Image: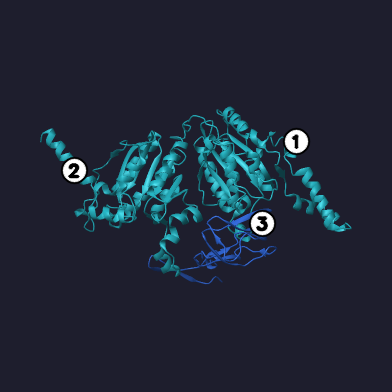
Amino acid sequence: MTTRHTLTLNDTVYETTLTRKYAHRKPFVPKDPKRLTAVIPGLILDLLVKPGDQVRCGQGLLVLEAMKMQNHIAAHDAGTIQALHVAPGDTVTKGQLLVEFQ
Amino acid sequence: MSLPKKMKDHAVKHAEATEPHPEAARKQAAQGKLLARERITAILDLESFHEYDLFVEHKCSDFGMEKKQLPGDGVITGTGTILGHPVAIFAQDFTVAGGSLGLAHARKITKIMDHAIKLGIPLIGINDSGGARIQEGVNSLAGYGEIFYRNTLASGVIPQISIILGPCAGGAVYSPALTDFVFVVDKISKMFITGPEVIKTVLGEEISMEDLGGARVQAELSGNAHFYAQSEAECFEQVKRLVTYIPWNNRKKADAFSPIPPRTQLGLERIIPAESNRPYDVRDVLRAVCDGSDFMEVQALWAANIVVGFARMNGRTVGMVANQPMVLAGVLDVDSSDKAARFIRFCDAFNIPLVTFVDLPGYLPGVDQEHAGVIRHGAKLLYAYSEASVPKITVILRKAYGGGYIAMCSRHLGADFVFAWPCAEIAVMGPEGAANIIFKGEIAAAADPEAFRREKVKEYTEKFASPYVAAANGHVDAVIAPHQTRDFLLHALEISEDKSEQRPARKHGVPPF
């Protein structure tokens, strides 16, 4: 049996069922500019900065090997490094926290 | 009335219809926005704008509308030129009833669209509107529908450009979505189907208008916008530049310019690192081969793992597509396939030859990719390349493995010429993976499996990770030194000028979109 749900659209409450995709959707979480996360799973090869370093926008922060490529992960904004949450040799998953900014 | 008197009367009427309401104009300026008329003037060549339908009025008599006079019914339409190229243009005027779209407003737009289609000239739409004019009810919806219908009829016939300079929400946003290029400006453009208020009511999620559908979001996350600018002035420069690359219509070719060599000999040999796992900016390669090193990137911020855009070779426009090893290792995925496929179809529709540069490790693995439909989105790229009958020239720079090799305009999808650099690696899969599969049993049985495996990887790399197996089979036409690339491309493009390809007759294909 499918469970009945409701959806409120244009001030009207509709009785309906939900698609599995809709039911499992993730609510919007604003991106925290102070936290840099991995966009692709891979292996940390090298760290190019250390805590306390001032970095400019576009500056390389670390090297993440993924898809057989040494990807240089760059800063999206200028800022100061608060902490590095990975070390060379670490395997990271998609979305894992890599660098925190002050 | 004598003619001089009538002329005076006309001058008064003209001024009433064109002079902005001071309070509304002040509000527009306070948001950093130009007035509709100023926008048209800023885009078009000096004094080239010819306005039509200035005195069109709405016929609505409900909800007190009969007492409301709306100059030009909130939209300015006409024709003019951009750097000498003719265009039809409309600009919604937010200072008149919030730029709201009623039937008369819509009919002005559809009239100028019909002109553009008949005359075979590009259409530029400036969107700045609060949406449907609610007082006009279903007639307002009819107006939108008639615009969408013409956007679709004009698609592939004349280039259509949308500039979003204000809100463009709800159904209204589907007109730009049906056009070829969407321009957005930071903090000014707002595009969404349902706004933050509705999302909050229905889902309980809070989000700002900027985070939901601001310029940056549309240019970087959704892929709805093609060009992003910091100001209206910068946006108009982008529009003018784009117009020089594209033809007036699908029966013409883009205007020829004087050929100029690449600005600098950027040292093509040195752009690509020796190790195949090192990133580089593929745009350096494009700039090193195209006229004046002048490359106009399209959708630069979205799906940056593939680069698409316009350049000139020997003065003629080409569309360039290239994997970008600098971003996500240059993989193909849902968004990059989608982005390239759309661009390829534009080029094919408007007689723009395609030059493809290949360096990719394959498709991006991931549950999210599979569940997002990388199969059907990826298929769009195969479809677009196979369908395109304009000259198609491919240069394999470095890695071309597996399905990625096929998808990136290989000989097998109808490329007219395929060239490869000596550092190209064209094979069914990377040496590591291939050796692990082919020699699985032998590796397991070896005295030192790891040493044996490494030896087999080396053997495979030497034998297959090169352009010569593909060249021996005729899949690659020539293995060329990087510095020969421009020469081979210019020659191939020159002799492909009159390429014609017959395809079986059909109403239209059924691409996987």
What amino acid type is highlighted by mark number 2?
Lys
- Compared with A47, B479 (above or below) is above
Q: Colour of chain A?
A: blue
Name the residue carrying label 1.
Answer: B472
Q: Local crowd at mark 1 within 10 Å, few (<14), some, or many (≥20)?
A: few
Q: Are marks 2 and 3 on the same chain?
A: no
Q: Quadrant of residue B122?
A: top left
Query: Which residue is at the front of the view, B71 or B267?
Result: B267
* Mark 1 / mark 2, whichever is N-terminal: 2
Name the residue carrying label 3.
Answer: A66
Residue at the left extreme, as displayed: B1
Q: Are marks 1 and 3 on the same chain?
A: no
Chain letter for the cyan part: B
Q: In the rendered structure, find residue B13 and report the number of the disc placed on it.
A: 2
- In space, the residues marked 1 and 3 are separated at their CA atoms by 31 Å
What amino acid type is highlighted by mark number 1?
Ala
Q: In the rendered structure, find residue B37 and report the number of the disc placed on it.
A: none
- In space, the residues marked 2 and 3 are separated at their CA atoms by 67 Å
Q: Is residue A37 visible?
A: yes
What amino acid type is highlighted by mark number 3?
Ala
Q: Where does the image place residue B62, in percent across and percent down from the top left?
A: 23, 56
* Quadrant position of the N terminus of chain B in the picture: top left
Residue ID at (44%, 70%): B204
Q: Is residue B149 visible?
A: no
Q: Quadrant of residue B152?
A: top left
